[in-house]
Amino acid sequence: MAVSTWQVLVFGVLPYVSFALFVLGLIWRYRYDKFGWTTRSSELHERRLLRLGSPLFHFGLIFVILGHVVGLVIPKSWTGAFGITAEMYHIGATVMGTIAGVAALTGLGILIYRRRTTGAVFRATTRNDKLMYVVLAGVILAGMYATIRHQVFGGSHGYDYRETVGPWFRSLWMLDPDLTLIQDVPVAFTIHIVIASILFGLWPFTRLVHAFSAPVTYTMRPYVVYRSRDEHRGSRVQRRGWEGP
Amino acid sequence: MKVMAQMSMVMNLDKCIGCHTCSVTCKQAWTNRSGMEYVWFNNVETRPGLGYPRTYQDQDRWKGGWKLTKRGKLTLRAGGRWRKLATIFSNPLMPNIHDYYEPWTYEYDMLLSAPQGKHTPVAKPKSLLTGDDMAIKWSANWDDDLGGSTETMQDDPVLKHMSEHVATELEKTFMFYLPRICEHCLNPACVASCPSGAMYKRAEDGIVLVDQDKCRGWRMCVTGCPYKKVYFNHKTGKAEKCTLCYPRIEVGLPTVCSETCVGRLRYLGLVLYDADRVGEVAATPDETDLYAAQRSMLLDPHDPEVIAAARRDGIPEDWIQAAQRSPIWRLISDFEVALPLHPEYRTLPMVWYIPPLSPVVDVVASSGNDAEDGRTLFSAISQLRIPLQYLAELFTAGDTRPVEKVLRRLAAMRSAMREVNLGRDLPEDVAGAVGMTGDQIREMYRLLAIAKYEERYVIPTAHTEIAAELDEMACSLDYEGGPGMGGGGPFGTASGAPTPVAVENFHALASRQTADHPSTPGRVNLLNWDGNGTPEGLFPPGHHPEAHDGGTPGSSAPGSETGPDKPPAGD
């Protein structure tokens, strides 16, 4: 079966467009909007629901992302070389993925409920935030649906995305997308991939950028930071006086 | 020894009348913005009271500042680096808006726009967070002057910490005001708590600041600060705090709160300290020794060894002189009357306080005794255990001896100077009883009671003689229109590096003062434009025929149809 035009657009063009937006957008945002680079925490307004929803959502999502990295980046033959059979992988990935996905989805549900019902938090929600929530929830819901439909209730082995989606994903990075691999992918996965691509394109322009400021260097620096006022004065590059204009 | 300079403040609590002028002027200058409605970089609390935010001193609950581990190692009370990262998605130790107060405005427009009716229209309070009607239940100084304190005072963390059952007794006898700003600590817990490394202590003058471009809004600084003087701007999602008005300090002006203080009770100046000893002093095993330990790390600016070390460490000459004239050094170390606020938090705070003698004076005076008499005051100080212990909980981690010593010195000054005012000699025995000389009493009186502006504020300007600055100074002459007249960059006007603001301001002001016409000719800097005239290029060209036709006056009469929009027919 030949690859249709819409499949070329969805699997061959959209990923590159959104990735370009993602990278260039992040660079642009970092250069021109360091001040806006935050997620505008609303913990000041409401603490109880956040305490429950936020860790649930974030930790769930971290495991979901790790699962995606393993599933998409590591070829089947590599895990096989470690003696992990397809069954073991399928059960492990489905169980852990479902738990992490449910945690993230529950957390997101609590957070969205909180955002809608707490007056001050709702007032602090921009249209940009709302769009982002729709897309983010869409990605997770579509992913959850695909997992439940094809992995949990899809027979003993489920749908083996590691034969199709994984190699296709890696072929994208080789700048030689092999669309024949993915043309027969179930609709649920297609929807998940499309919304995910949109999410990556939107990412730099939403509050999601805070994911890229995870403060890992905190564990390595000395506690108290000293800084000279002269280092950061004005926009000029500091030169010595005798070096000429 | 590594010598560093610290810009510090001392407040003389005896003179504070609780007028909140400092809070209001500070708010107008710095936090009069949305997102910061609930924030007071400077606030004045009535003590005993709950403080702002409520019960911020209860570190069992809020876990601000540092503590010692069982092995005597200094660690953040709220937990170290890994714990911070683990709780980054939801910080359980951060105060809620209701621990501060929900900011509000009034529906003033209703007073004018309400339709005619039977009743006088009222301006209802509206929440600034939700926009809804709200009942006002608390504010930044709700228990001002002990208002309603029979309901709330028992929750004062300082009172709770005191062993005696004093609350009701205390209310009868004792009240004072405590103005608070950021402490600009030598061992700041907020800086240590910041995961992004956005908070820093300025190496030159020790002012603690937040880099707004680096702050990512993780909110750990709010928890880290035991004084709760870092605030979260809920609009921008970034931390903000008292800056010690650094733009004013850099040019030698006192902070807004100091400048506008009605009681003239604030002192600003430098102290030199040994930065190598910060960790060791902050880890002093016994809490009550922290006051003495912190004093021991401040360096005598008159000591030749210290001066030599300061020069070696790059502290400019005028800053060393400023440190020698510093009222802070004199109050802390010469007269020994200033004490740190809550040294037991181990942050080594650098806004110190002279504890108030007035509660004691009030008690003595109301009992019908002579409140100016040294001996009466001395015995009253040692007998009035309650105020003494309360002050000790605030300033010396519970040790009453340093507080008693300060109050005795203040009492000695009071009674000795009365003798002088009555035309008698200054009684050396009264001075001697508190370990001072008559001359010292006079000097202290001059600094505390006369309190001349230039003696209260000894602020060296930011030093311009360092190399990086010289660069800007040297090149500034070469800017277009500058005295050097080097003019523009390689690609003509406006190319190259931007003109330093100082140069731009200089020319704008000069031309405004010397020009016949108002406003700057040629280029328009909106920041400098005074609103007069119509500088070239600021407004789009009007329908002035001459402006377009240039050299051919008369060819177009007013009202003719030959404007630039409408080319003449046949062209």
Image (cartoon, rainbow, N blue to C red):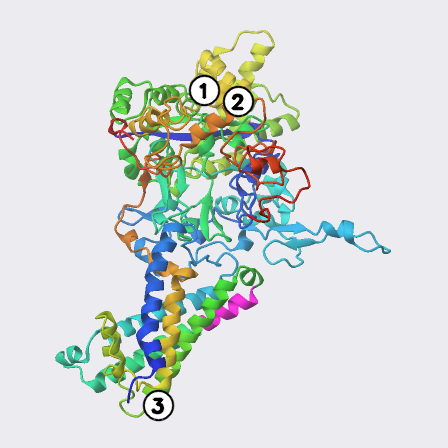
Residue B272: percent from left, percent from top: 34, 27
Q: Residues within 10 Å of mark 1 (few under 14, many from 20)?
A: some
Q: Can residue B95 be seen here?
A: yes
First-in-chain label (2 vs 1): 2
Q: Secondary structure at mark 1?
A: loop
Up the image or down, B262 lies above or below A61; here it is: above
Can residue B122 be seen? Answer: no
Vertical placement of A109 versus B151: above or below?
below
Q: Nearer the viewer, residue A26 or A119?
A: A26
The residue range painted magenta reads: A107-118
Main secondary structure along the magenta-highlighted residues: helix
Residue that lies at the very extreme toward the front in this rendered image? B570
Horizontal arrangement in the rendering, residue B112 relative to residue B180 (left or right): right
Q: Position of residue A50 (x, y in %)?
A: 46, 64
Q: CA distance from mark 2 to mark 3?
A: 85 Å
Distance, label 3 to label 1, CA atoms, is 87 Å
The quadrant in which residue A203 appears is bottom left
Secondary structure beneath dot 2 equals helix
Say if the magenta span includes residue A117. yes
Q: Amino acid at mark 1?
A: Val
Q: Which residue is mark 2?
A: B411
Q: Secondary structure at mark 3?
A: loop
Tell me the quarter of the image containing the C terminus of chain A: top left
| The magenta stretch spans residue A240 | no
Q: Quadrant of the N terminus of chain A?
A: bottom left
Identify the residue under disc 1. Answer: B434
Q: Extreme left residue here?
A: A81
Asked if residue B98 is positioned above or below residue B206 in the image, the reply reads below
Residue drawn at (57%, 37%) of the image:
B549
Residue type at mark 3 is Phe
Q: Pointer 1 indicates a residue of which chain? A: B
Q: Share a chain, discs 3 and 1?
A: no
